[in-house]
Amino acid sequence: MDIRRRNNVTVTGCVDGPVLLLAHGFGCDQNMWRLVLPALAESYRVVLFDYVGSGKADPSAWDERRYGSLEGYAQDVLEVCEELDLRDVTFVGHSVSAMVGVLAAAKTPERISRLVMVAPSPRYIDDEGYRGGFSAEDIDELLESLESNYLGWSAAMAPVIMGNDDRPELGQELTAAFCATDPDMARIFARTTFLSDSREDLKTVAVPTLILECRQDVIAPREVGAYIRDAIPASRLVTLEATGHCPQLSAPQATAAAIVDFVGAA
Amino acid sequence: MMCRTDQAPDPEEEKDVDATDAMFTSLLEDSAEELYEQAPCGYLSTLMDGTIAKINATLLEWLGLERSRVVGRMRFTDLLTVGGKLYHETHFAPLLQMKGEVSGIALDIKTTGKQRMPVLVTSKVKTSEDGAPLLIRTTVFDARDRRAYEAELLRGRRAAEEARRQAEADRVRLQEALAVLQQSLLPAELPAVPGMEAASYYHTASPDLLGGDFYDLFPLDAHRWAFFLGDVCGKGPQAAAVTSLARYTLRAAALHDPDPVNALTTLNTVLHDRYTSGEGRYCTAIFGVVEPHDGHVEVHLASGGHPSALIQRADGSSDYLHTPGGMLIGVLPKATFTAARARLLPGDTLLLYTDGLTEARTGPDRTLYGDEALRTFTTTQPAQGPQALITALTGLLASFGDGLHDDTALLALGPTPLATPGVTT
Amino acid sequence: MSPLTITTRLAATGPVLKIIGDLDYETAPELRKALDSLSMAPGQMLVLDLAGLDFCDSSGISALISARNLAIEQCGDIALAAVPANTLRILGIVGLDQVFTILPDPATATNRDLMTG
């Protein structure tokens, strides 16, 4: 199988630079990294990809069982690393991808030597003595939202996607694929993401880890950032002056600077 | 009719226009501010971090909130249900960041009394002259009716998908059932007959449609074996029912009286009586008895409307064992069947087949393969016994491709062939 | 594959069905349907004009036998007219050439009966 095509792998930046592997979270695709890309490409070899089931990854590679667990997504990461023979990689995972990175790093410590977690959460649903921020019913509501937006999707999104004449850099290649995943695949990814519990896996992290949280994040509350910092000995927690769940979009300079600072210093 | 294009407007008409404008103005809102506040949709403006800076009265009324509790104190996502928040963070906000505009997104807002109100949200980023984002303007449309309709559509889609899945599962189950049934119409494997070799092949034209071809080989007593091969008119489950009836009738009849003409006559009576009312069901068949002796096999067979059996001789020739005038079985209460006898010597093979073989279409002009071509083909094959002949014919059938449009059964019998020179056994 | 068309006309000797196209598993029910709507007076002859019959398989043969049964039930007779060579060959194999009256053309059927009748 052609992994590069399957996962829509893109390689950019400095050919000889240290490797950054940027992994998107639930919802969109590798375009999530567009605004931090210019800053990172200056000093790093940047590898981007879409998980199977997202963006422009090959939909025929979809396997309901494999992608029904985070292990399946971690397998995508490992296969991309092997295909490109990446070594000494800094894995930058957004949201649920941070936990995918934890799983991948545990499997191939020889390839993944640093983790950057952007707005991570090891568990979204509240538990005894743990606040993730959501109840199980909340997750059902999200699934409903996905469904109701799928119906009107093509009609609602087409003008937005096509009508970017004033910002040609966001032009044609930002196709409907961005954030408009097949609803069946999105449902499974959503379920896998929001019903996951990776708290135990945090204990396996043996590599230097940077945790980037936002000052205000409705998906990952501040408690979660502190929880992860306490669970991983070799970790550093940085709180970005940003709101929302996507600091790489809402505060790209600060996000890129924090990554450069961490990798450069490592 | 006068053309007034080039003339000054009629002063009377101008006066009318002024009056109409005045009337509309009195009906309309007296200010843009009132239009903003009382518009039939919600308006709000937020800072780039989502903090609400301005909100109209319509939206506040939907939310059941006081302006003072909202402006500067709440963010847009605070107005949403939890599912809506997640959706906003994972889809809406990234899209808005990337494109500066997002339209027609379905979200739910929390209204008074913990109710949910489906809305359609459109947001646009306002930028400064140098392109820096300043604030987000958002319109919120009441989508209660639309969402109800969409929910209906979704239910319909789910039901259709479920029906499709069910149909697919049914189809698979049906095919499995058909395959099992088809197998029950044929012997699982031919019995070993001392002093003889026997071989068979069955080609299924369509996995969805049970074929009506059948054959069998079974012992009558210590010295004699009965065989038959036939073809029921038509296809599908009705034909399969006749196939089953024909197979077991012939087996039972043979044990009672193995004379070939008598066995076929019994089958004729059974089919004619069974299907006397309504749509008739008929078949053609050759029934025979073989008796292996030292060094040769005696064959006694009869045909009811079936293509003649072919004998491949050890000397390289091939000839039909003609049974003219034997009638289609089950049509008439009294039918005539034609018997024939033959002696098979080592290297001779008796071949029975259904007309799927001879009625196959071959070549670019799709001409009928025919019995002469079959005879010629057989003469070109080395006389190495039943199994070798069936193998050769299987290859021939495969070469017909889609020209072979009907089920085809083959049964070959003969004395155990002598060891081929040069081959030790 | 050519579709089946059946046209029925009533001659003095009885109904004449002109069968054009393929008579097979798919189309045989159409002949049965055409037969169902026929009524024959005792002594009449049902003529099936097969000049335009392109193809006839075992399902087609069954339908021809149904036609014969129907004619006999109504105390009439049946004849096949202008039978194409291939179908005639098949009728020979299955022994039905002994059961059906086979005529060179439909006129032979309708005229003969007019003259003798």
Image (tube, coloured by chain):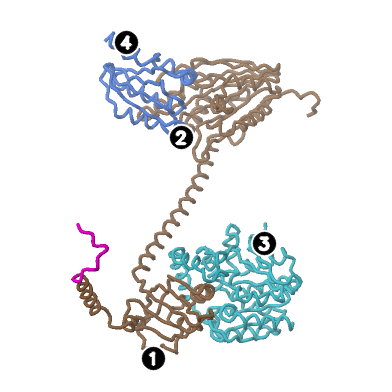
Nearer the observer: mark 2 or 1; the answer is: 1
Question: In the rendered structure, which segment of residues is drawn in magenta?
Answer: B1-12
Callouts 2 and 3 on one subunit: no
Quadrant of the rendering where the N terminus of chain B is positioned = bottom left
**Could you say which is closer to the camera, residue A149 or residue B202?**
A149
Any magenta on residue B240?
no
- Which numbered tag is attached to residue B241? 2
Overall secondary structure of the magenta stretch? loop
Residues indicated by labels 4 and 2 sit on the same polypeptide chain = no
From the top left corner, tell me how far across and down residue A154 is, in percent.
Answer: 46, 63
| B189 to A74, vertically: above or below | above
Name the residue tied to disc 4: C112
Secondary structure at badge 4 equals helix
Q: CA distance from mark 4 to mark 3?
A: 82 Å
Asked if marks 2 and 1 fall on the same chain, the answer is yes
- At numbered mark 2, what does the secondary structure look like: helix, strand or loop? helix
**Chain drawn brown, letter?**
B
Query: In x, y percent, where is residue C12?
Result: 26, 16
Q: Which residue is mark 1?
A: B68
Q: How far across and down, in percent of the image, does residue B361 sit?
A: 55, 28
A105 or B240: nearer the eye?
Answer: A105
Q: Colour of chain C?
A: blue
Which quadrant of the figure has residue C66?
top left
Tags 3 and 1 touching, CB below 8 Å: no
| Res A4 label | 3
Q: Quadrant of residue B422?
A: top right
Q: Quadrant of the C terminus of chain B?
A: top right
Observer-side mark, 4 or 2, equals: 4
Residue B11 part of the magenta segment? yes
Q: Label 2: chain?
A: B
Residue contact between numbered discs 4 and 3, judged by CB atoms under 8 Å: no
